[in-house]
Amino acid sequence: VAVSDDVGRLAPECEAAIYRVVQEALHNVAKHAKASLVNIQMERQEGIIHLIVDDNGQGMENTDRWNGRSFGLAGMRERVAMLGGTVEVESVPGQGTRIEVIVPMEHCGAEEGVHARPVLTAVSARGESA
């Protein structure tokens, strides 16, 4: 997990939505991916919150097919859309899956001068720090 120092605190509804997206992404990794490593990165860049969750699991054949049929991915998209953001899913069979979330800061109401503590750790699929 890597959270940039400049993310700061966000509006409660934004923090909750991002938390739920990460929670669902990790649930999907645990249930489907057969991954040994998951990376989570979040940073603030030029007026956006940028979140990436990627794994080294088995990947998916056709992400377009899953985007319409997966309640988990649909829920992620719905939560992020309510904040004016987007969710992109990229996956390659045998090479893992990457979920990228972009949310405009104008919808997150970040407080200036309040910073999150960065944590720089890799986490195995079993939840162990690497």
Image (cartoon, grey):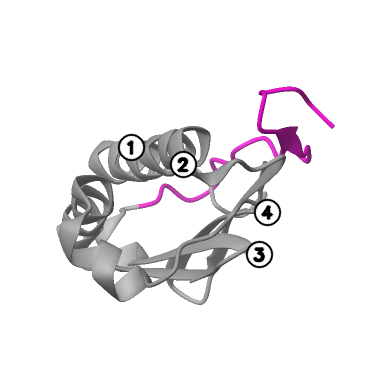
Query: Would residue 50 be seen by someone viewing this image from the given angle?
Result: no
Of label 3 and label 1, which has the lower sequence position? 1
Q: Earlier in the sequence, mark 4 or mark 2?
A: 2
**Mark 2 or mark 1, whichever is nearer to me:** 2
- The answer for how far apart the CA atoms under marks 3 and 2 are is 13 Å
| Label 2, label 1: how far apart the Cα atoms are | 18 Å
Relative height, residue 64 to residue 35 (above, below) = below
Labelled pair 3, 2 in contact (Cβ < 8 Å): no
- Magenta segment range? 110-130
* The label number, if any, that marks residue 32 in the structure image: 2
Residue at (18, 47) in percent of width and height: 71
Residue identified by numbered label 3 = 95
- Residue 99 located within the stretch drawn in magenta: no
First reached walking from the N terminus: tag 3 or tag 2: 2
Image side of residue 43 versus residue 60, left or right:
right
Q: Secondary structure at mark 2?
A: helix
Residue at mark 4 = 56
Judge from the rendering whether residue 111 lies leftward or rightward of residue 34; answer left or right: left
Q: Main secondary structure of the magenta part?
A: loop
Determine which of the numbered discs, if any, sits on residue 85 in the image.
Answer: none
Q: Amino acid at mark 4?
A: Asn
Sooner in the amino-acid sequence: mark 4 or mark 3: 4
- The residue at 60%/41% (across/down) is 34
Upstream in the sequence, badge 1 or badge 4? 1
C-beta proximity under 8 Å, tags 4 and 3: yes
Residue reaching furthest to the right: 130
Callout 1: few (<14), some (14-19), or many (20+) C-alpha neighbours within 10 Å?
some
Label 1 sits on residue: 20
The residue type indicated by label 2 comes to His
